[in-house]
Amino acid sequence: MKHLASSRRPLRLLVPVLLAISIFAARDDKANAPEFQTEETSNKQEPAVSEPPATPPATKTRSSKAKANAAGAPHKTKYLAGEDPEYAKQCGWPVRQPPPLAGAILPSRRIVAYYGNPHSKQMGVLGEYPKEEMLRRLKVEIARWQRADPSHPVQPALHLIAVVAQGKPGQAGKYRMIMPDKTVNDVYGWTKEAHAIMFIDIQTGHDDIHTLLPRFEWILKNPDVHLAMDPEFNLIKSGKLPGSKVGTYDAAEINYASAFLQDIVKKYNLPPKVFIVHRFTRNMVTNAKQIVIRPEVQIVMNMDGWGPPWLKRTSYKDYIVQEPVQYTGFKLFYHNDTKKGDPLLTPEEVLRLNPTPIYIQYQ
């Protein structure tokens, strides 16, 4: 499928002056990175992945096969991008894996998460509203997903950006800001109140995941706290500033984080951890086939780019379906997905994707 020029989701930056927020527009300077809309691509129509066979014109010389078609033989189902089960099967879905360990959330439950940071109204819905209103809105979304798919109980979640990429180096010179433990504990308290689980999301900037991840063992040792990594803001190798280029993680770094979680599960006798890896370009995750699946860790590749529905489906197909890892996720942006006048995808529409996303994130 022809790749499209891209326009990135807004960069999420915290400036360490009374936690004031600066928002930068993130741009991908790779000419061949085909992901999210520009002004020029926003009006293109969504392509179908599979077209029904055309019925031959009614002539006296048409074949018996054509006559059978005209008599009502079934046509091939038409799927939108990312929905075709045969294509998913050809790509390697479902992924072969051992049965989930006791206490595993996936795949029996679907996680529906609110994402953001309580110090910013621009970084996501988690901080856009006061706590009570935010939790009320989350409860509404939980009910919608439960109605759409009664076969999967919904697990609420709060997804906290606990390390936030920065436009300036800061005192450590690492272009990132680590949230105070109090902020993490506050959101963890909200999690308990909502009978939810919590995700710690790390944007490394110019820091190293090997340095940052152990910093959060104190909270990850809880059975209801899980991990997310955002390749978009891992720029230590390129040396680029957050917002000037989309970053990347290699399978080796993802495997390091997965092994770290595995060790925590064993050390503290915990149920399996859920591990989210964000992705909306090909190069955000390199050597994906080398990602190791561990019984103690459930990996979700989360399509977290914004744009019109057709482009989100196409990106899901190109960057999630084409490179199977373990489980899949899908992100919905209340503002960015709809700012060009497009509707926000409904739970019913997202559930048509194949494989069906088991992790849903709202920003």
Image (cartoon, helix red, strand yellow):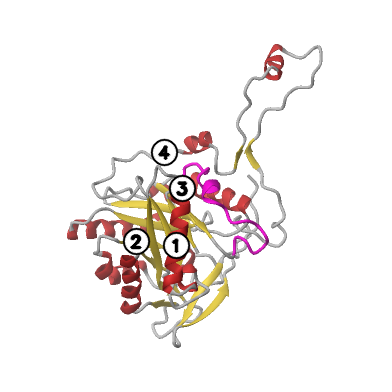
How far is disc 4 from disc 1 in space, using C-alphas? Answer: 29 Å
Q: Which residue is mark 1?
A: 138
Is residue 111 highlighted in magenta?
no
In the image, residue 67 above or below residue 18: above
Image point (51%, 36%), residue name: 85
In terms of secondary structure, where does tag 2 sit?
A: loop
Question: In the image, residue 291 lies at what x, y percent?
Answer: 37, 50
The residue closer to the viewer here, 322 or 22, is: 22
The residue to which callout 2 is attached is: 196
Q: Earlier in the sequence, mark 2 or mark 1?
A: 1
Q: Are marks 4 and 1 in contact (CB under 8 Å)?
A: no
Residue count near mark 2 (Cα–Cα under 10 Å), binned few <14, some 14–19, many ≥20? many
**Label 4: which residue?**
94
Cα distance in 3D space between marks 3 and 1: 14 Å
SS assignment at label 3: helix
| Mark closer to the chain start, 4 or 3 | 4
Decide which of tag 4 and tag 1 comes sooner along the chain. 4
Closest to the observer, 132 or 68? 132
Question: Is residue 329 among what the camera can see?
Answer: no
Residue 190 sits in which quadrant? bottom left
- Based on the picture, tell me whether residue 341 belongs to the magenta stretch: yes
Residue 156 located left or right of residue 220:
right
Tell me the quadrant of the picture where the N terminus can be found.
Answer: top right
**Real-space Cα distance between discs 2 and 1?**
10 Å
**Mark 3 — residue?**
147
Spatial distance from mark 4 to mark 2, Cα to Cα? 27 Å
Mark 1, Cα crowd under 10 Å, few <14 / some 14-19 / many 20+, is: many
